[in-house]
Amino acid sequence: MTDVEKRMIDVAGQHWRYAGSLDAAVRDEFGISTTRYWQLVNRLLDREDALAYSPVTVNRLRRLRRTCRR
């Protein structure tokens, strides 16, 4: 995993109190839209190295993804 990919997992695992905070953080840190950011994070969730890097965050996001797909 690259440092950018690790940071994406870290940002996805944070709890955001205010609407727009995540959007601004993604734009400032990665220079991409929030939609593109979540596309990349979803790909990362399927990788074993992401699970090894941050198992709690990756498993929580996987559960959320499964719930949203239902």
Image: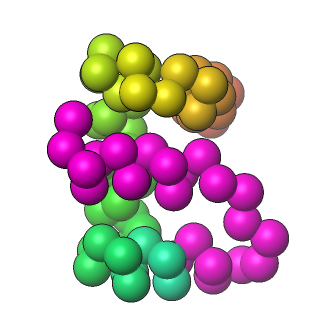
Q: What kind of secondary structure does the magenta stretch mostly adopt?
A: helix
Q: What range is drawn magenta here?
A: 1-23
Look at the image and tell me in which quarter the C terminus lies.
top right
From the viewer's perspective, is 40 left or right of 65? left
Closest to the observer, 19 or 1: 1
Confirm whether the magenta stretch covers residue 14: yes
Residue drawn 39% across and 84% down?
28
Among the 4 quarters of the image, the one containing residue 42: top left
Query: How is the structure coloured here?
Result: rainbow
Q: Is residue 48 above or below residue 8?
A: above
How far across and down, in percent of the image, does residue 49 sit?
29, 21
Residue drawn 58% across and 33% down?
57
Among the 4 quarters of the image, the one containing residue 36: bottom left
Look at the image and tell me in which quarter the N terminus lies.
top left
Residue drawn 63% across and 79% down?
21
Residue 35 seen by the camera: yes
Residue found farthest to the right: 17
Number of dots carrying numbers: 0
Q: Is residue 67 above or below residue 33?
A: above
Confirm whether the magenta stretch covers residue 18: yes
How far across and down, in percent of the image, does residue 19 sit?
72, 78
Closest to the observer, 25 or 19: 25
Among the 4 quarters of the image, the one containing residue 27: bottom left
Residue drawn 42% across and 73% down?
26
Residue 66 seen by the camera: no
Q: Is residue 35 above or below residue 45?
A: below
How far across and down, in percent of the image, does residue 54 sit?
49, 29
From the viewer's perspective, is 1 left or right of 11? left
